[in-house]
Image (cartoon, rainbow, N blue to C red):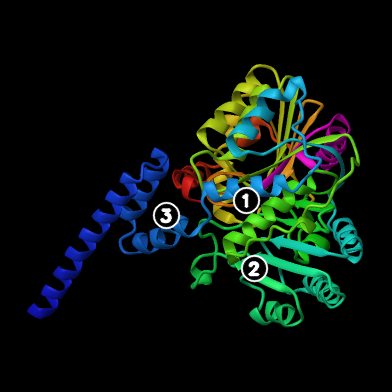
Amino acid sequence: MEATSNLILVFQILYVVTALGTMIVVISENRNPLKTISWVLVLLLLPLVGLIIYYFFGEDSRKQRLISRKMHNELSRNAIEHQDSYEKIVPPKEHKPLINLLDRVGEDPLYEGNEVTFYSDGNEKFEALFEEMEKAQNHIHIQYYIFMDDNIGHKVKDLLIRKAAEGVKVRLLYDDVGSWKAKRKFFKEMQSQGVEVQSFLKVAFKLLTSRVNYRNHRKIVVIDGRVGFVGGMNVADRYVDGVSYGVWRDSHIKIEGKAVVGLQISFLIDWYSSRRELLSSKDYFPPLENKGDNLIQLVTSGPVGQFKDIHLGILQAIANAKDSIFMQTPYFVPTDSLMLSIQMAAMRGVDVRLMLPRRSDTTFVQIATMSFLKEMLDAKVSVYFFEAGFLHSKLMVIDNSLTITGSANMDVRSFEHNFEIDAFIYSEETCQMAKDIFYKDMRQSTLLSIEEWESRSRAKKFKESVIRMFSPLL
């Protein structure tokens, strides 16, 4: 009996020492104070479990395995040097502060001569993707956060295998956590048939790490260095068939023109960081003609480096807005600076509209999202709930000439932890296309009133407040 008591005492001492040591590490990392407090609360309120959660979700040592900002910039410059026709473009006056910021912080150049095609329907996107991949003669570079082995996944797989058999160089990069439900033999089959397959940041315990940090959330396809796709759609049947309660509404774009270089650079950097294989052939950067009038910056962001490019770009874009800001996001867990920026825009008279899904695929994030809406309504932001299914679109339309779309959600995870890519598109024509999509979705949405929101039960409000305490960790 005494031995058992001594063993328990030793265990308690070891736990206390370990927990205190972990808290010291968390505090000494100089993170966002709110995030630091959240982790300390987890460690204090959830004995043992808190340590396990921190190990899988909070520990920062994985950054050491990722590509450095220095190497990122060197690879980017190497790619740019391959383009004989590349010239620095004088930015339009109204967007000069934003364009200069993105160029200086992330070395994200401005590309001219681009045509943009919008897809708000999964069937149309995959039809266009298959059509372009069928034309491939040199290479197909394909990267997705989620690549399922379902019906649409097998269609993509079969096409990639067939193109590889034709002599096209096919490379597939998928996120190891995002695609964990797909069977390994699904990817091994492609590998055995000539497709080069690589997972991003492989993890050992996927069941315990469904939202682990530092995931590659990008969705990029580049075909022969001439046509590119980017946006929010993964490879999964739900993007085509929808869900039990309606459509799965998302946004994706096809780019033809010089900005395809930006997509190619992003893919090759991610390929290098995962496989340590430097692909620098001039075949990946063919001469590109002007295809349209869109000016585009392809902005990448991730846990590497001090500044978070997409987050800074969105803040600057909101600050520049004069007339309107239309936003769609599946998850709204904003940073303090983003929250304040949106409120200030609405209070200075800008028409700010925020569209969210009525139902979500992530319970805790949805609860946290609800806790921010009172502050939006108080600032006169118009909040809409999409009712026709699940809204997964990541879209911002600002005034009449700026559209932002890509993989980044409006949450801390996208801004600080995940590898993301957004297209900043400077074009009145594309802006109108994006607005038309937003207006169409508004017809399937409900405008939230302050009276309705304040009439919720106290229990629901309290639950949201509790979950919000941990929002920096979601």
Is 17 situated above or below 456?
below
Q: Earlier in the sequence, mark 3 or mark 1?
A: 3
Neighbourhood count class around disc 2 (C-alpha, 10 Å): few under 14, some 14–19, many 20 upward: many
Q: Position of residue 265 (x, y in %)?
A: 69, 51
Q: Are marks 1 and 2 in contact (CB under 8 Å)?
A: no
Q: Nearer the viewer, residue 149 or 302?
A: 302
Q: Residues within 10 Å of mark 3 (few under 14, many from 20)?
A: some
Image position of 86 with respect to 284: above or below: above
Separation of disc 3 and disc 1 at Cα? 24 Å
- Circle 1: residue type: Leu
Q: CA distance from mark 1 to mark 2?
A: 27 Å
Depth check, front residue: 23 or 355:
23
Of the numbered discs in the image, which one, if any, rests on residue 179? 2
- Local SS, label 2: loop
Relative to residue 303, is residue 123 depicted above or below?
below
Residue 58 - label? none
Magenta residues span: 421-446
The amino acid sitting under disc 2 is Ser
Residue 147, x across and y down, in percent: 70, 67
Q: Which amino acid, mark 3?
A: Asp
Task: Determine the secondary structure under disc 1.
Answer: helix
The residue wearing badge 1 is 75
Residue appearing at x 12%, y 74% in the figure: 5
**Residue for badge 3:** 60
Is 438 in the magenta?
yes
Out of 66 and 320, give the one closest to the viewer: 66
Q: Using residue 453 as the reference point, say whether residue 304 is left or right of it.
A: left
Q: In the rendered image, which quarter is residue 439 located in?
A: top right
Of mark 1 and mark 2, the one earlier in the sequence is: 1
Asked if labels 1 and 3 touch by Cβ distance under 8 angstroms, the answer is no
